[in-house]
Image (cartoon, rainbow, N blue to C red):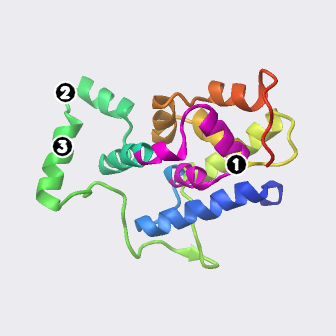
Amino acid sequence: MFERFTKDARAVIEGAAGHAERAGAERVEESHVLLALFDREGSRGSFALAALGLTPARRQEVVRELDGARRRGGLSRADAEALSGLGIDLAEVVSRVEEAHGEGALAARRYGLGRHWSGRRLFSRGARDLLTQSLRVALGHRDRHIGDEHLLLALASRPGVPAEVLADHGVTYETLNRVLYGGGEARAAG
């Protein structure tokens, strides 16, 4: 599958591994892929994000939102609402755990536990599924390559924190698809 990845898509994957390493994460997660997508300039994915108002200047908002989810142990707002329906106040749980064990205690940071095959950071199941989904997205659009735009579309189509954060900023699968493929809009070079 990796032979189908464009230069931009490969840079996103490498960037995601870098984000995971800097965060001390055991594995590359979908949120690391989202952060790496924000690092790109002049690609189809960066064009789509900018066209929908999610510019590099707003990157810090996304980072804050992803960090908030990380502090909640990776739970989305939908998860928090479901727990609330059961009478569990997730904010209170996080607060008490952090009071006892320090900020970010619920975050999935496990320094030194990651195993690296050939010097590379492993991908979580969700991140691997994201790569598979990006192939499906590319094939669905009859594209012969997998670009960063396909990674972005796949992220927006999957349930979880990255899609929730994107949707909060008006970036959904439907809006991305419209910008990238619909309405006669110009395609950015990839």
Q: Which residue is mark 3?
A: 93
Whichever of labels 1 and 3 marks the residue nearer the N terminus, that label is 3
Residue under pointer 1: 148
Label 2 neighbour load within 10 Å: few <14, some 14-19, many 20+:
few
Q: CA distance from mark 2 to mark 3?
A: 12 Å
Q: Quadrant of residue 12?
A: bottom right
- Rendering coords of residue 45 (x, y %): 67, 43
Residue at the spot 21% in from the left edge and 46% down from the top edge: 94
Crowding at mark 1 (Cα within 10 Å: few <14, some 14-19, many 20+): many
Measured as percent of width and height from the top left, residue 181 is found at 78, 29
Q: Earlier in the sequence, mark 2 or mark 3?
A: 2
> Helix, strand, or loop for circle 3?
helix
Please name the amino acid that badge 3 sits on.
Val
- Residue beneath label 2, please? 87
The amino acid type of the residue labelled 2 equals Gly
Residue lying at 58% horizontally and 52% vertically, measured from the top left: 127
Picture layout, residue 140 above or below residue 9: above
Can you give x and y, in whole percent of width and height, for residue 174 in the image?
64, 24
Give whichever of 178, 58 is nearer the camera: 58
Residue located 64% across and 42% down the image? 152
Please determine whether, in this image, residue 5 is positioned above or below residue 180: below
- Looking at the image, residue 102 sits to the left or right of residue 80; the answer is left
- Residue at 83 percent of width and 48 percent of height: 145
Q: Which residues are magenta?
A: 32-60
The residue furthest bottom is 119
Q: Secondary structure at mark 1?
A: helix
Using the rendered view, name the quadrant where residue 79 is placed.
Answer: top left
